[in-house]
Image (cartoon, rainbow, N blue to C red):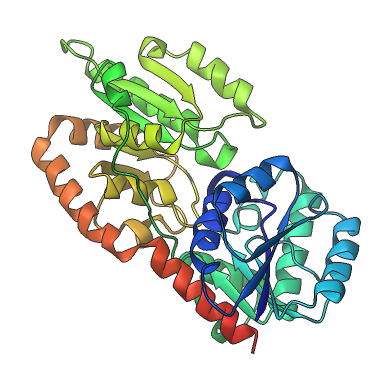
């Protein structure tokens, strides 16, 4: 069987990790050949670093354009894949080949104010509705995402497969936490508007006030890509913060550094208003770190009772949760143990195998 995989997001954030983890596992299957679409040299380097077998890498066009759809249709006519797997919203609309698409979230539909533009939101909605019509199967990474997708498209639930993301951690990593003044809370993620980073800064300011007379005051570490619209506003917010002396921005780190940073923290804090899955929450639980998160989207489903949930935008509740975890070792230990048990539900091996099963079934 010949499987085409659109990997043009392989070098980007959470979707990139999803593509890499699945590619790294399913391409070793016998009696299967793979066509992998990449877009630039960074993508090619990322794919080659995986050292995949039986994979033909093909340069594709930029995403989200008319030219893209013309190219994808020609690609399917030329290479005749038995199944086309799209791990993101775009797919070959004008091809009759069997298609499987993964939906990670519907943030722009649920919260129109967060879309980069109303035209982009309309494109996203149209593509999801076309996917509901033309794709043989739809994979959603959580029940919450599946419910949202069904709401916006009216798709029959028997065509939706819920396959959770996994977690795959390198246990050996440099102890970056030793380079920081402890203790500290950590946020790992981007600064997109729905991530609500300003809420975290405001909550930390309340924590800082409560700890003003303590000998050791906690820090807030912000890690992750932040070159997005409104990032300058957040940078200015940090500079004007009453707790700016205790807020540190590290930017992007490699996987080992992130693991060390998370493992050495008091807690990972995620104030995001919406998550399609919440990969960093699962990674923190796997590393034995307490998690505090806003209960938006799939977070209650993925985290269960293994962390502290607060209402999105509720700065007071968020600061109270941070203080509770910091000052209560028994609570931290309880959350750690619950997290370690919960994380057993998620593995990339399981994700990849279930995804491959869907692809093989759709390609029949």
In the displayed structure, 174 sits above or below 41; it is above
Q: Is 270 left or right of 156, judged from the image as shown?
A: left
Viewer-proximal residue among 347 and 282: 347
Seen at 90% across and 58% down, the residue is: 66
Quadrant of the rendering where the C terminus is positioned: bottom right
Tell me which corner region of the image, top left, top right, bottom left or bottom right, holds residue 164: bottom left
Q: Residue furthest left?
A: 330
Can you say whether 242 is above or below 322 in the image?
above
Rendering coords of residue 62 (x, y %): 81, 49
Residue 137 visible within the image: yes
- In which quadrant will I find the N terminus? bottom right
Rendered residue at 49%/57% (across/down): 21
| Residue situated in front as seen by the camera: 281 or 315 | 281
Residue 208 pos. (x, y %): 29, 18
Residue 286 falls left or right of residue 221: left
Residue that lies at the very extreme toward the bottom in this rendered image: 364
In the picture, residue 360 is in which quadrant?
bottom right
Task: Tell how many labels.
Answer: 0
Do we see residue 11 in this rendering? no
List x then y, in percent, for residue 350.
40, 69
Identify which residue is drawn at 50% across, 32% down: 224
The relative height of residue 277 versus residue 208 in the rendered view (above or below) is: below
Q: Residue at x 31, y 17 (%)?
A: 179
Residue 185 or 23: which is nearer the viewer? 23
Q: Position of residue 105 (x, y in %)?
A: 57, 58
């Amino acid at each position: 069987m010949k499987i085409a995989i659109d990997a043009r997001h392989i070098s980007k954030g959470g979707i990139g990790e999803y593509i890499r983890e699945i590619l790294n596992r399913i391409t070793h299957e016998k009696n299967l050949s793979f066509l992998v679409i990449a877009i630039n040299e960074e993508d090619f380097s990322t794919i080659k670093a995986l050292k995949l077998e039986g994979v033909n890498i093909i340069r594709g066009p930029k995403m989200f354009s008319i030219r893209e759809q013309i190219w994808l249709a020609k690609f399917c006519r030329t290479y005749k894949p038995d199944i086309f797997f799209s791990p993101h919203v775009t797919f070959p609309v004008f091809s009759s080949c069997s298609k499987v698409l993964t939906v990670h979230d519907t943030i722009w539909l649920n919260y129109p104010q967060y879309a980069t533009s109303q035209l982009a939101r309309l494109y996203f909605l149209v593509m999801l509705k076309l996917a509901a019509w033309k794709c043989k199967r739809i994979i959603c990474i959580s029940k919450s995402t599946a419910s949202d997708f069904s709401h916006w498209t009216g798709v029959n639930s028997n065509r939706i497969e819920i396959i959770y993301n996994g977690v795959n951690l390198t246990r050996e990593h440099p102890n970056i936490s030793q380079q920081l003044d402890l203790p500290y809370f950590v946020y790992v993620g981007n600064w997109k508007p729905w991530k609500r980073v300003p809420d975290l800064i405001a909550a930390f300011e309340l924590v800082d006030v409560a700890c003003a007379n303590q000998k050791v005051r906690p820090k807030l570490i912000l890690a992750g890509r932040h070159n997005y619209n409104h990032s300058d506003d957040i940078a200015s917010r940090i500079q004007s913060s009453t707790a700016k002396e205790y807020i540190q921005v590290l930017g992007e780190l490699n996987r080992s550094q992130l693991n060390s940073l998370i493992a050495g923290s008091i807690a990972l804090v995620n104030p995001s208003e919406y998550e399609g899955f919440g990969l960093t929450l699962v990674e923190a639980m796997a590393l034995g770190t307490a998690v505090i998160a806003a209960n938006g989207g799939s977070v209650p489903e993925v985290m269960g009772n293994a962390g502290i949930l607060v209402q999105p935008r509720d700065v007071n509740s968020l600061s109270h949760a941070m203080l509770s975890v910091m000052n209560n070792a028994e609570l931290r230990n309880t959350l750690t143990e619950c997290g370690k048990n919960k994380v057993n539900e998620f593995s990339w091996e399981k994700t990849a195998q279930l995804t491959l099963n869907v692809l093989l079934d759709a390609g029949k």
